[in-house]
Amino acid sequence: MINVFSFFLQPFTRGISFFSFNIIYTAVVLGIANLTFFKALFKATAPEGFILSAVCFFLAFLSIHALLFWRPVTKILAGFFLIGNAVASYFISTYNVLLNKTMLMNVVDTNMTEACDFFNASFFGYVFWAGVLPLILLFFLKITYAPFPKELAKRLLLIAISLSVIAGVALPQKKELKVFLRENFNLRYQLVPTSYVSSAIGVFNILFIKKAVIDDVTKGFYATRYWKQDGKKNLIVFVLGESARDANFSLSGYNRDTNAPLTPYLKDLIVFHKTVSCGVVTRVSLPCMFSHYKRTEFQDDRITYTENVLDLIKRAGYNVTWIENEIGCSKVCRRIETLYTCQDRDCYDERLNDAFKAAVPNLDNDAVFVLHQRGSHGTLYHQRYPQAFERYSPVCQTGDIGRCRYDELVNAYDNTLYYTSFLLADLMAYLSTLTDRFNPVLIYISDHGESLGEERIMLHGGDWEDAPDYQKQVPFLIWMPAESRAAFGLNQACLTNQTATQRSHDYIFHSLLGLSGVFVDVYDKTLDLFTPCREQMP
């Protein structure tokens, strides 16, 4: 027993060679931090292919560590990656996220209030045993090095042998490997630390190196009051939902009546089904939907975005106000009046309605309000609605949603949608009382959808192409009372017919411009939902 104990203490008393340390450290990185990666790799390959791949990865990491780790910085770099790997592997294994450039940009834009939702007992426990504990052992470990010429020769020999073995395995299967990498491209974003290191380099390039391309969208600008001049002002309320997915909207066929509060307003509702979002993260969807770019044209790595639809409507003389209850407007509202309704960790979205109602009595002009909800933002779905709106139970009551049953998670999420429906109905009821002064219109659309554990995927984020439909298909509805339809010269039957075609965020810019009577050269009437239904064209 004493001999065994002495054997394990030897690295901390007498020391351990760098070569031995490299083998142990590489085994820890691949065996602990990359369990999810190797599980996915095992499912995607035959047993013999998996073994050969594992050997190649081991040799590749040995070589990378041999290049990076030298006497002054070995423990600093190794310790940094231990903590980074632990954090990264927690989110990969718990939420099945991909650590690509888009996801890391989303992290950069996340504030502390939102980030706190992810800091729970499971997170700290995982980071402790997978990162902090190995870091403590690393701190007390004694690593010995050979004289520099000999150390360099040994490392170069290791790298040469490793590259030879990897080439010997990969080159004979070059064609098969090319097909495998194309079909399993996302595996690269589950391998740590290479995934977050390469993505961090991409984010650095976006933030500090790449210059933004700015297009002038004001060419050909003009405004016209084409609607019926009845002495009323236009009042457009744009409710921007958060993480609401169309699959759970009863108005789109969901088997639960999550939109029950909207029932009294169905005759004036135009409901679009399976509307396609521009992105699956807020920082992409918001600037994209308010810009003139289509989803396929929008570049989410622009630092400075062009003037958006709200800027153009403001230029036309409208009062434009952004009321914020979420984490921010992703630069969309930086040139218009902005009101913040929440300074705390969690505030219910009814504050948006209250702030809007407080502003209306002072209006003496055409106006557009954007109400940015906290909506159905995870992970704490149960904190997005008051207790009185817990229509479905039991609910998941922790931010560590990986520990909740699927039905508990869905119950909590559906309650958020029911609460959102209540708030929309409340706005419609209030706007209905204003038809003597205004031509009111309410538009609701979500920025992106959400995954609730389907295919082991949680929350949202990453690249649009890789995301499931749950994250890309969002609810979209327009409420316009008869008085407003008459003022704008719009036919209700025609508007309803517009729902027969799947729509997307691409329509927001052009539809808002057309409804407001604001036009520029980049305006596309084929993307204006109201164009086919106007009795009098602008």
Image (cartoon, grey):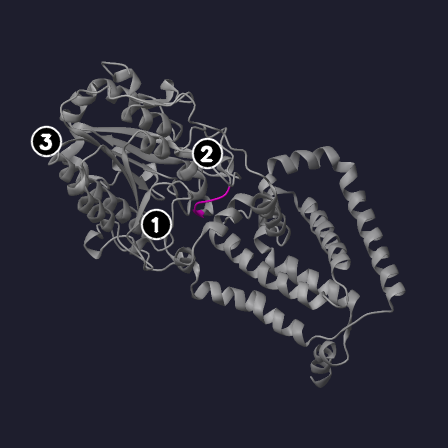
Residue linked to disc 1: 326
Residue 292 vs residue 163: left or right? left
Question: In the rendering, at what x and y percent does residue 36 appear?
Answer: 56, 53
Report the disc number at residue 306: 2
At label 3, the amino acid type is Asp
Q: Nearer the viewer, mark 3 or mark 1?
A: 3
Residue linked to disc 3: 436
Please tell me whether residue 169 belongs to the stretch shown in magenta: no
Using the numbered discs, state the Cα–Cα distance from disc 3 to disc 1 in whole angstroms.
32 Å
Where is 503 relative to 133, above or below? above
Q: Magenta segment, which residues? A: 458-462
Residues tagged 2 and 3 counted as in contact (Cβ below 8 A): no
In primary-sequence order, the first of circles 3 and 1 is: 1
In primary-sequence order, the first of circles 2 and 3 is: 2
Q: Dot 2, how many residues are within 10 Å of its Cα: few (below 14), some (14-19), or many (20+)?
A: many
Using the numbered discs, state the Cα–Cα distance from disc 2 to disc 3 in whole angstroms.
36 Å
Q: Secondary structure at mark 2?
A: loop
